[in-house]
Amino acid sequence: MIRLKPGESSQLSSSVLLSTAAAADASAPASLLLLSPGAAAAEAPPPSLPGAGWIEVCRCNPQAQLRGTILPAGSWLTASGGELHLVAAHVPGGRKQENDAAATERSLARDLEEWVGLCAQRRALAERAAAEGQAWEAQAEAQKLPIDWGGLKLHRACAAEIQEHGLQRGAPVGLEATLSALCARRAAATGAPTRAKLRREERAAPPRRWREVALGGSALEAVATDALSFPLSGALLAYLAGVDGAETLTVHILGPEPAAELRCRRKWLAMLAALPHVRSLRLLFCGPRVPARLDGVAEELVLTEASGGGGAGSGGGGRGAGGRLSLAFLRGDYHHRRPEAPAKFSQEQLAIAFHPGLAEHAADWAPSLRPLLRRGTPVGLTAYHPPEAELDARTLAALGGAAGAGGAGQLAAAPRPNPLASRLPHLDELFPGRTYAANAFITLAAQGRGACVAKH
């Protein structure tokens, strides 16, 4: 049992699996806040009043809530609001800090096994409940889990909009209006310096709130964010990696899915429009799910000031808010096909894998990610859930250590909530009562950088 008084902080000596969290006083509901390892100054406790970097893990009422969230060793916890009582079990392998890479990988494997086992138990429970005809919210009530009624209402409203308009995943509705809003922001930043490397204070940031591009209010707009979350999360990762200041930016997208990254490829103009200093954006999509008809294909799109976007092969580009987007596609494993990339796509400055399931499929991803990490290429990931994001980040850091990416600087990989996550909620089948969304968490692994915080 861990007890936290309001504003009191406590550091975990080992990783734990949080099972329940409850506020002690019904009149003072509390929130559990988390500061991940590396986000606080070494050997110094965090400030008593939470500031930048703190993540809200859960909001708690007097009734205990099942969380199933892994909190990593070295994390700082604090209570915001009232007094907080936590029940947590030590995660196997987290009882002591282990410094050597082999021991760290063993610890990660045990933690992953614990999480996968929990998911398997929850999945079996969900299947039994579904077989009995029990609705999602009824399952939550039967298990005494809190229900995200707001998320459920939005989920149903979005489903109605999708059916009414015949929408497809990956194809954003209202793309032209979004591009126009992004181009207006881009045009306002054209007076900023443009050269190969810009100091951070000179760089105009991409949007970090949906309302900055006039999205996120209605259910239909929430559906639109689901597809646009991919290019705009890519822009945010480029900014956090510090590679957004160059006129030409090359990004490799690993393991793209046909119904997500590859449908309505014109949406990637939004990534270019969100990076005001980039005049030429080159995206290489490579993975086994790339359709055979796209293998070896290259496309050119132009972003124009007047219309917010251009078609394939259109001319111009110019300065101002304009720019050029180049796309190339390779089918197959990245580590096999990368040498075949067209010359102008060969020198990546950033690599991104959306929802890779890295921790569970590390053996499949390692041959592709290790060379990138060895070269010092920043690598960005996204995830649906907090435990998935934390395990993916630890796996990425372990791969970096095995690849010899430590070098002159430490490889930092810390997951953070993504302010440009999709607003289209899905019902969590494993933990009924909760909802989740695409690209909810982002992780950036970058050599010699501190943990990157995506502030709301």
Image: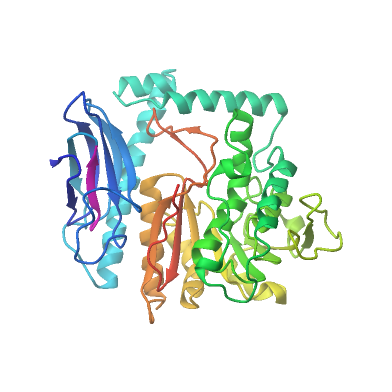
Instruction: Give the image location of residue 386, x and y in percent.
Output: 38, 46
Quarter holding the N terminus? top left
**Left or right: where 73 falls relative to 364:** left
Instruction: Give the image location of residue 58, x and y in percent.
Output: 31, 37
Frontmost residue, 291 versus 343: 343
Magenta-colored span: 73-80
Q: Main secondary structure of the magenta part?
A: strand
Instruction: Give the image location of residue 417, x and y in percent.
Output: 43, 48
On screen, 101 above or below 327? Answer: below
On screen, 154 above or below 285? Answer: above
Extreme bottom residue here?
408
On screen, 87 above or below 298? Answer: above
Q: Is residue 77 magenta?
A: yes
Frontmost residue, 24 versus 437: 24
For the point 75% across and 58% down, the residue is: 294
Q: Quadrant of residue 412?
A: bottom left
On screen, 288 above or below 383? Answer: below
**Left or right: where 397 falls relative to 8:** right
